[in-house]
Amino acid sequence: MKGRKLLKINLLVSIILVFGFIITSFLSYNANYRTSLSNVEQVSSLTAESIYYQLTTMFTRPVNISLTMSRDTLLVTQLNEETKQMNNEEYISTLKNYLETYRGKYNFDSVFLVSEATKRYYNFNGVDRVLTEDNPENVWYYDLMKSGQEYSLNVDNDEVDGADNAITVFVNCKIYGENNKVLGVVGVGIRISYLKDFLKTYEEKYHLRTCLVNEDGIIEISTTHTGYGRTDWFSEYGRESIRSQVLDWKSDKSNLEFWTENEDNSQEKSFVASRYIPELSWHLVVEQDTGSIIGQMKIRLYLTAVIIIGIIIIVLIIISLVLFKFIKQISELMEERQAIFKKATEELYDNIYELNITKNGYANAPTKQYFESLGAKGLPYNKALKVVAEKQIKKEYREGYISTFSPENVIKEFESGNNHLSYDFLITQNDMDYFWMRIDAYIFLSQEDNCIHMFTYRKNIDAEKQIERRASTDEMTGFLTKTATEHSIMSELSEKPEDLYAFFIFDIDNFKQANDQFGHSFGDYCLKEFTEVIRNHFRDGDILGRIGGDEFVAFIPIPDTRWVESKARELSAALNFNCVREEKEWKLSSSIGVSIAPEDGNDFKTLYEKADAALYRTKQRGKNGYTIY
């Protein structure tokens, strides 16, 4: 009788344990699955962000150097004289040495020049070949000639002797002569193997697939394919259903992120994060599927079930210990996944904080301690945000910082479907020295408390900003380059189109005489003196640019049009002085033309044309003066 009762009790306990195990396993499986999906989204998103910023940095130098060569007067002169010098070895040697110098200086794999007049292809070895339109290897050149683009990128094999047809990314820039006539193409090449290895590190580390595709969906660069092979990414991986969704995304400010069902009818789905790179006209695609995650979770689930059933059969006495072990295993699994994600994000960013936006507070102790260390102890998040801004952030960036990360804006952005915010600003830690910082914030609805949470990732981007500044600054004068000047002016006009602005053009009168009479070294010295005078008559934040050899512009907000007359008179007088260096002396003066926005135009091109016309009238009157359009 006792045996039967014991059997019934054991059977009842076993049924309860098995039933409880089934329920617990089901709930744990779902919780782990949702957590894993969230991790997939965040890791894929952060990977796309990281690859995007590193690629743009990686391609900035070759593109800028190619554009610099395309504007080199030496190349323009050489190409204009090519038909007369075709058989002149000294002429060919000059081009060869020029290209070899750039290749050696910047460590490019290839540097080349193509003449539009003769179709001759020059490189650091001399004349390599003549491009013909019937050769499919030359399609890149004739397509660029027919397009309206200033430059293009293409992936192709390097046909130069000694290159072994290595697959290479080429940057191709048009060279313009008088009347915007295209004289040829100059550019550089980077071996594709460098970029494939770069993407491979991410794929191996985070178990995802990365690639760069062009506007037609053709894979330009991946760990297994290149643009030379003409492989369609959407066909290759069964993703035709998302082709238009990915290729139509043209934003370089944020990722396109979504889940998609696999087209092989499997239960797994994939998370896709895509980013458009306008400098390359390519799309970065990062994809991670859930197949391996589900497989690992099922293996763990089956193994745990066997262990639990075995323990129930062997001895019911240690049921409590088995349950404790099971719970411990689940906790360790969660902690392991959290540790993996934390490690991955900490390698990309300097500091990570979590905030409870719904409750206007902090989600963990480190975040609370950070705000308290800055004097915001006991304050809710929205007020602490203002304290941090006042204490550390440069004045002109405070309003943008507060408005971007305020609880009201975060909730509004999340409700509109945007889960990513980003803001770059200048910050100090000693009240004197400022450096550039970027905050990337990711917004999500926490399943634990049903509140909107926000992760903020802080990263020092001072080195990145310094590279951008050097790339957009004229080395001799410290003024902006022509391209950077145009971008800055267009940005200013688009932000405040109703405000009044003055557009000044300065041209040094008879500057060629200074170079001819005293040499280019003296001429360069006078240029620096001239621009220093201009700089001293404008404020920090005014746009100053060099758009030609001895032609400069200034773009500034103005109170009214009468102020422009006074400013132009002041500048004309200041720029009329003797340039003296050692025993050399030259009388320097300037012709000035001015246009006013928005009455004379609301874009760079129109304002430049109007100011240039005014400058021409100044020269007609005898130079050394100014004219307002």
Image: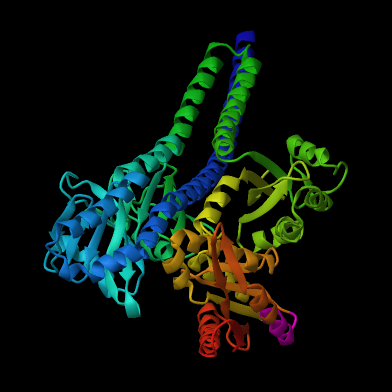
User: Measured from the top left, where is residue 6 in percent x and y?
Assistant: 63, 13
How many numbered discs sit on the rendered protein?
A: 0
Q: Nearer the viewer, residue 386 or 605?
A: 605
Instruction: Judge whether residue 241 can be spotted in this image.
Output: yes
In the picture, the quarter occupied by the C terminus is: bottom right
Left or right: residue 136 compared with residue 336:
left
What is the quadrant of residue 78 in the picture?
bottom left
User: Measured from the top left, where is residue 179 in percent x and y?
Assistant: 34, 80
Q: Which residues are magenta?
A: 559-568
Give the farthest residue toward the top: 2
Q: Is residue 561 magenta?
A: yes
Q: Is residue 322 magenta?
A: no
For the point 81% across and 38% down, the residue is: 373
Left or right: residue 246 compared with residue 333:
left
Q: Nearer the viewer, residue 337 or 136?
A: 136
Relative to 25, residue 151 above or below: below
User: Measured from the top left, where is residue 461 in percent x and y?
Assistant: 59, 47
Give the farthest residue toward the front: 583
Instruction: Judge whether residue 252 can be spotted in this image.
Output: no
Q: Main secondary structure of the magenta part?
A: helix
User: Measured from the top left, where is residue 266 in percent x and y?
Assistant: 37, 48
Relative to 565, residue 391 above or below: above
For the point 35% across and 51% down, the residue is: 265
Q: Nearer the viewer, residue 67 or 520?
A: 520
For the point 23% across and 53% down, the residue is: 96
Give the farthest residue toward the right: 378
Left or right: residue 603 compared with residue 516:
right
Q: Nearer the viewer, residue 10 or 271?
A: 271
Look at the image and name its color scheme: rainbow
In the picture, the quarter occupied by the N terminus is: top right
